[in-house]
């Protein structure tokens, strides 16, 4: 996978807490094992009225034209809670999001996102509030997230975020769990050669 460092783009606001994975991508759409084709059903029950893709809900932020093409999702605490499904970050990425900014994430969703090169970061509510205000005042305002600097910039605002060093490295290098293992291929090979043959 390709590594990620800087994400620059407009923002789609989703000012709601405790959004679970079944709301992100309902279970009936978890029909494949590839990472593409899920974006059309992202937030399906909120984007479409009566489950009909021809009846788009105009009040849902992702359906509003001013947020079309946003690459950053701005939301609230406990995003990605509920059942474990790797399809949730797949759907977000397939829709076009490269970064999710929230107050907190469910642990499994967070790990799945990092493993799939979706940059997820947390900010305190006081800073999130300022970003929500920026987006409300100007839907085309641009946010730049720089992983190496661990910074979020929006016009005159600049916030710093924390991220575990191994998560940061994996995102920068484009490593998933398999890629992390292959980073130690030489050591693994050496260990296997040194083992007693009967073990």
Image (cartoon, helix red, strand yellow):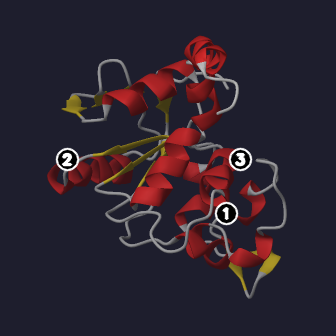
Find the distance from the CA under tag 1 to the CA under tag 3.
Answer: 9 Å
| Identity of the residue drawn at 53% across and 46% down | 113
Discs 1, 3 touching: Cβ within 8 Å? yes
Packing grade of label 3 (10 A; few <14, some 14-19, many >=20) is some
Which is nearer the N-term, disc 1 or disc 2?
Answer: 1
Query: Which quarter of the image is occupied by the N terminus?
Result: top right
| Identity of the residue drawn at 59% across and 34% down | 176
Which residue is denoted by mark 2 in the rendering?
Answer: 127
Left-right relation of 87 to 141: right
| Identity of the residue drawn at 36% across and 54% down | 136
Which x, y percent locates residue 33? 81, 54
Query: Which quarter of the image is occupied by the C terminus?
Result: top right
Which is nearer the N-term, disc 1 or disc 3?
Answer: 1
Q: Secondary structure at mark 3?
A: helix
| Residue 55 drawn above or below residue 164 | below
* Residue 69 appears in the rendering: yes
Which residue is denoted by mark 3 in the rendering?
Answer: 94
Q: Secondary structure at mark 1?
A: loop
Packing grade of label 1 (10 A; few <14, some 14-19, many >=20) is many
Which x, y percent locates residue 26? 68, 75
Which residue is denoted by mark 1 in the rendering?
Answer: 42
* Residue 71 appears in the rendering: no
């Amino acid at each position: 996978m390709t590594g990620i460092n800087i994400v620059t783009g407009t923002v789609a606001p989703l000012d709601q807490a405790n959004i679970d994975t079944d709301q992100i991508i309902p279970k009936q759409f978890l029909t494949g094992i590839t990472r593409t084709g899920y974006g059309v059903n992202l937030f399906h029950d909120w984007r479409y009225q009566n489950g009909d893709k021809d009846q788009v809900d105009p009040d849902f932020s992702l359906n509003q034209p001013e947020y079309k093409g946003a690459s950053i999702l701005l939301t609230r605490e406990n995003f990605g809670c509920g059942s474990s499904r790797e399809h949730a970050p797949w759907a977000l990425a397939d829709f076009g999001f490269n970064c999710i900014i929230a107050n907190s994430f469910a642990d499994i969703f967070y790990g799945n996102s990092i493993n799939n090169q979706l940059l997820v970061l947390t900010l305190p509510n006081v800073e999130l509030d300022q970003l929500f205000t920026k987006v409300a005042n100007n839907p085309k305002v641009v946010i730049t997230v720089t992983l190496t600097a661990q910074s979020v910039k929006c016009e005159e605002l600049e916030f710093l975020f924390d991220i575990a060093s191994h998560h940061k490295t994996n995102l920068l290098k484009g490593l998933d769990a398999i890629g992390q293992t292959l980073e130690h291929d030489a050591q693994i090979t050496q260990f296997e050669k040194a083992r007693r043959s009967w073990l």
